[in-house]
């Protein structure tokens, strides 16, 4: 049985620095889709997009969240801000993790890539 989702809301946005890009003040935390079905992952992403959420955040440390978020987010990739992170502290390992995340998330770039604490 699929979980029910709340009724429609409209998330506020703010300008991201001086870029002119408007980002939702609430991010979709990729860990939400950890261990979910592909169908539910797609439903959650679609619901978030419908609410005006355009900031998505995920990390390799969130179990299989990247595997689930990649296909669900793919149709919207050009319309969202995608942030990812690494907890690797050497360049070779961080680069390898970056490349794997790009592959799993089905994208050629991240809008923000950070060191995870």
Image: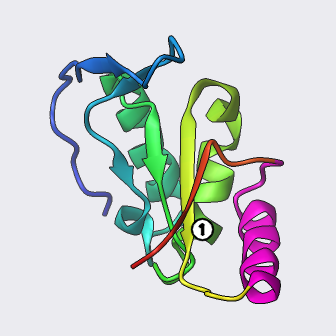
**Depth check, front residue: 61 or 5:** 61
Question: Where is the N terminus found, in terms of image quarters?
Answer: bottom left
Question: Among all residues in the image, which is located at the extreme top?
Answer: 20
Question: Where is the C terminus found, in terms of image quarters?
Answer: bottom left
The reply to whether the magenta stretch includes residue 16 is no
**Depth check, front residue: 98 or 11:** 98
Instruction: Read off the residue under disc 1.
Output: 66
Q: Secondary structure at mark 1?
A: helix
Q: Is residue 114 left or right of residue 31?
A: right
Determine the residue positioned at 26% across, 38% down.
26
Q: Is residue 74 left or right of residue 55?
A: right
Residue 14 % position (x, y): 31, 19
**Depth check, front residue: 110 or 4:** 110
Determine the residue positioned at 60% across, 24% down.
79
Applied colour scheme: rainbow
Q: Residues within 10 Å of mark 1 (few under 14, many from 20)?
A: many
Residue 101 % position (x, y): 71, 68
In the rendered image of this protein, does residue 20 appear above or below residue 85? above
Residue 35 % position (x, y): 44, 78
Q: How many marks?
A: 1
Residue 67 is drawn in which quadrant? bottom right
Q: Is residue 24 left or right of residue 39?
A: left
Boundaries of the magenta span: 91-108
Determine the residue positioned at 52% across, 48% down.
42
The reply to whether the magenta stretch includes residue 104 is yes
In the rendered image of this protein, does residue 48 appear above or below residue 83? above
Residue 87 is drawn in which quadrant? bottom right
**Depth check, front residue: 91 or 113:** 91
Residue 114 % position (x, y): 54, 62
User: How would you classify the magenta stretch by its main secondary structure?
Assistant: helix
């Amino acid at each position: 049985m699929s979980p029910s989702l709340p009724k429609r809301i409209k998330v506020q946005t703010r300008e991201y620095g001086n870029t002119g890009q408007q980002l939702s003040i609430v991010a979709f935390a990729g860990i939400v889709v950890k261990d979910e079905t592909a169908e539910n992952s797609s439903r959650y992403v679609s619901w978030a997009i419908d609410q005006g959420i355009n900031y998505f955040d995920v990390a390799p440390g969130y179990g299989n969240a990247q595997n689930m978020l990649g296909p669900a987010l793919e149709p919207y990739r050009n319309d969202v801000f995608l942030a990812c992170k690494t907890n690797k502290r050497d360049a070779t390992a961080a680069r390898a993790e970056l490349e794997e995340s790009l592959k799993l998330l089905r994208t050629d770039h991240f809008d923000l890539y950070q060191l995870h604490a």
